[in-house]
């Protein structure tokens, strides 16, 4: 089994389903409201565990009711939460609008996630025993950097999802093995809209890049080789929330099990395609048998 450590956020997603997202100053009547466990870190942890990884989660929930629910979601998906802290105060929340095309817009309030500014005792020892460490940018950058540097000290592969998009310090890029931006994040990081050109730019900073391209699949680039495009299965998306996280969680498991990159990307795409056909983040993440059947 692939041992995966995740250092990242937990959020309760407060989701409004509407025909179209309101413009500035506009009020719209939605169809439905749901409270769904999410957060990029927890989503990647759940996705990887359901895909067959042995997963541990480092981060923090709040001391509110959401915190207890977020813990429960992780545990019930088989994620080890021994090192998940509880911070006094509210859990992270994500305020999400999903439109009739399945596209979303999100405001994240960090809550407890904002208290994770550095590794705590025990975190580095856990990272040291993992095959890989999954990181995103919903925790303070200082903690993300701490985690990535700890992983590098112990020869653990780091996979960074640079989301929400923001400029990345060179120290973090220096300890990132695989960067997985979506095309907008890749454009923000490089100033270049074309994903192929953006991938070339990113390879100056990290050795391997996967740019996810929504329904168009993904683009893999590594130094000294021709880039590879892997398609996504054609499906009808009802809610893409968590698609990128599902993709990364499944990709990590596949790579840890020794699948070559093209096959691993195809397997991750099958997992993400299952995710987009169901509402919600953690609620939509597929189990291994479903991914195997779909790929
Ligand atoms: P999100 O923020 O919605 O979780 P993202 O913006 O991080 O996702 P995307 O590039 O939109 O990332 O999607 C990640 C992966 O999910 C894609 O590479 C693809 O495999 C899959 N995916 C996303 N949308 C679709 C879709 N409409 N149909 C099939 N697969 C999809
Ligand atoms: O990537 C999807 C996640 O982003 C949601 O679950 C939400 O919590 C936001 O953090």
Image (spheres, helix red, strand yellow):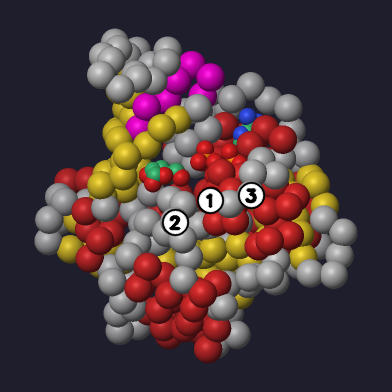
Left/right placement of residue 150 relative to residue 92 reads right
In what quadrant of the picture does the C terminus appear? top right
Residue 93 falls in which quadrant of the image?
top left
Examine the structure image and report whether residue 121 is included in the region drawn in magenta: no
Element at label 3: loop
The residue wearing badge 2 is 166
Q: Quadrant of ligand 2?
A: top left
How far apart are the alpha carbons under marks 3 and 2? 14 Å
Magenta-drawn segment = 96-102
| Cα gap from disc 3 to disc 1, whole angstroms | 8 Å
User: Which-is-in-front pick, marks 3 and 2?
Assistant: 3
Instruction: Answer whether labels 1 and 2 touch (C-beta < 8 Å).
Output: yes
Q: Which residue is mark 3?
A: 192
Q: Earlier in the sequence, mark 1 or mark 2?
A: 2
- Residue, far left: 88
Few, some or many residues within 10 Å of mark 3 (<14, 14–19, 20+): some
What percent of the width, then of the height, locates residue 65?
A: 17, 46
**Mark closest to the chain's N terminus, 3 or 2:** 2
The secondary structure type at the circle numbered 1 is helix
Q: Residue at x 34, y 19 (%)?
A: 22
């Amino acid at each position: 089994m692939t041992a995966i450590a995740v250092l990242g956020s937990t959020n309760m997603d407060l989701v409004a389903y509407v025909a179209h997202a309101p413009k500035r100053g506009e009020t719209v009547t939605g169809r439905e409201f749901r409270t769904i466990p999410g957060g990029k870190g927890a989503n990647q942890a759940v996705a990887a565990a359901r895909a067959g990884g042995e997963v541990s989660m480092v981060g923090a929930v709040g001391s509110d009711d959401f915190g207890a629910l977020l813990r429960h979601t992780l545990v019930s998906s088989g994620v080890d939460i021994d090192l998940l802290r509880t911070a006094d105060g509210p859990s992270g929340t994500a305020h999400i609008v999903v439109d009739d095309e399945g596209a979303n817009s999100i405001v994240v309030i960090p809550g407890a996630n904002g208290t994770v500014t550095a590794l705590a005792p025990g975190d580095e020892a856990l990272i040291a025993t993992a095959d890989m460490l999954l990181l995103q940018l919903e925790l303070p950058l200082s903690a993300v950097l701490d985690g990535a540097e700890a992983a590098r000290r112990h020869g653990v592969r780091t996979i960074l999802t640079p989301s929400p998009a923001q400029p990345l310090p060179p120290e973090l890029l220096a300890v990132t093995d695989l960067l997985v931006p979506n095309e907008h994040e890749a454009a923000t990081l490089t100033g270049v809209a074309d994903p192929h050109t953006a991938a070339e730019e990113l390879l100056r900073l990290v050795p391997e890049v996967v740019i996810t391209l929504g329904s168009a699949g993904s683009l893999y680039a590594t130094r000294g080789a021709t880039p590879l495009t892997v398609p996504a299965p054609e499906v009808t998306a009802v809610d893409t929330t968590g698609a990128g996280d599902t993709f990364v969680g499944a990709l990590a498991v596949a790579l840890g099990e020794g699948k070559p990159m093209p096959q691993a990307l195809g397997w991750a795409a099958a997992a993400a395609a299952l995710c987009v056909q169901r509402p919600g983040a953690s609620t939509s993440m597929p189990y291994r048998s479903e991914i195997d059947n779909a790929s």
